[in-house]
């Protein structure tokens, strides 16, 4: 850094408009460069960008492309996520924890999550309560509503459609929440509805929205307080069941709709797989599925089958 002490860089133009995100991004680049003990010239050369381009980036006046940011990250011996502000890069402890977990397989990561849950949440009564809150996860058309209601009736539990609870909190439909307020607002309503369900009902079957697993905080809350069951089905069954409910929209762009559904399922499968139990509804008629799911859940809870 001696070069910059002798020849300090010129200050950015006073009139330059600076977006808060770009300012924060620039500060992270400067911090990482300082931490590595690298000059701006050295980083610019390693990243194959001009010093002025890098200076603009550090001052928050340059809107770099993703490829340039990737090149800068490599030049700084850092992950792109560090430049973008990933929370796991915000402190030495986070970085050390991430280093321990990096490149671990799914089984190791699951054990780590369970150990952390036990560390920060008292076992015993909380664990027992978790088995009497049953949450059904999976894509739309898996049977969460129909099987969930029948399961709740059999067990004598309350039954909650979390999507309906979200709409009550928001005072409008799910579609309107997304259109009017955006995804972040929807996730807040989703968390509020989930927290209330957990607090109010010690014995409940919850049919969750298919995309709940896409939000790590809400999904962790669900895993922590509920016994989760992934209701699986073949993509064709998902589509036909939704159409049977009277909603023809998924079929409107067929076969593109089927391809989209398969991509969504593939993208979420790793999260759905975190469930305590997997149950393939395509393998049964609805009546058979109810009887088999009832048998398995009663065994978990400790009730007569």
Image (cartoon, rainbow, N blue to C red):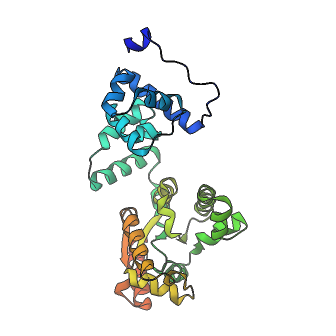
Q: Inspect this view and state whether residue 268 appears.
A: yes
State the residue lying farthest toward the right: 171
Residue at position x 40%, y 32% from top? 93
Q: Inspect this view and state whether residue 77 appears.
A: no
Q: Is residue 103 above or below residue 187?
A: above
Image spot of residue 273 (x, y percent) = 36, 65
| In the image: residue 13, left or right of residue 63 | right
Q: Which quadrant of the structure image shows residue 127?
A: bottom left
Residue at position x 61%, y 30% from top? 16
Q: Which quadrant of the structure image shows residue 228?
A: bottom left
Q: Which quadrant of the structure image shows residue 185?
A: bottom right
Q: Is residue 301 above or below residue 32?
A: below
Q: How many marks?
A: 0
Q: Where, quadrant-wise, is the N terminus in this rendering?
A: top left
232, 289: nearer the viewer? 232
Image spot of residue 191 (x, y percent) = 59, 58
Image spot of residue 132 (x, y percent) = 49, 67
Residue at position x 55%, y 70% from top? 204
Q: Where, quadrant-wise, is the C terminus in this rendering?
A: bottom left
Image spot of residue 292 (x, y percent) = 38, 83
15, 270: nearer the viewer? 15
Residue at position x 35%, y 27% from top? 43
14, 24: nearer the viewer? 14
């Amino acid at each position: 850094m001696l070069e910059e002490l002798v020849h300090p860089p010129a200050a950015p133009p006073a009139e330059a408009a600076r977006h808060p995100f770009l300012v924060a991004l620039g500060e992270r680049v400067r911090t990482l460069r300082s931490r590595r003990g690298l000059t701006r010239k050295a980083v610019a050369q390693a990243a194959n960008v001009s010093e002025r381009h890098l200076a603009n980036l550090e001052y928050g006046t340059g809107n770099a492309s993703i490829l340039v940011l990737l090149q800068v990250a490599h030049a700084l011996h850092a992950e792109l996520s560090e430049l973008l502000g990933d929370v796991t890069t915000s402190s030495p402890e986070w970085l050390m924890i991430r280093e321990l977990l990096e490149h671990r397989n799914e089984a190791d990561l699951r054990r780590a999550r369970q150990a952390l849950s036990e560390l920060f949440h008292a076992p015993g009564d909380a664990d027992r309560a978790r088995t009497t809150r049953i949450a059904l996860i999976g894509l739309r058309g898996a049977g969460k509503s129909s099987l969930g209601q029948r399961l709740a009736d059999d067990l004598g539990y309350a039954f909650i459609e979390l999507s309906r609870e979200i709409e009550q909190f928001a005072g409008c439909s799910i579609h309107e929440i997304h259109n009017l307020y955006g995804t972040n607002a929807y996730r807040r309503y989703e968390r509020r509805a989930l927290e209330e369900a957990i607090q109010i009902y010690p014995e409940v079957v919850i049919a969750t929205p298919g995309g709940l697993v896409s939000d790590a905080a809400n999904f962790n809350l669900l895993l922590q307080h509920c016994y989760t069951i992934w209701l699986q089905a073949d993509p064709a069954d998902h589509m036909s069941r939704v159409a049977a409910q009277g909603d023809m929209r998924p079929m409107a762009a067929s076969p593109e709709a089927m391809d989209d559904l398969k991509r969504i399922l593939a993208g979420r499968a790793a999260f759905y797989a975190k469930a305590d139990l997997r149950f393939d509804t395509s393998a049964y008629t609805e009546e058979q599925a109810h009887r088999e799911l009832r048998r398995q859940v009663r065994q978990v809870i400790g009730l007569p089958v």
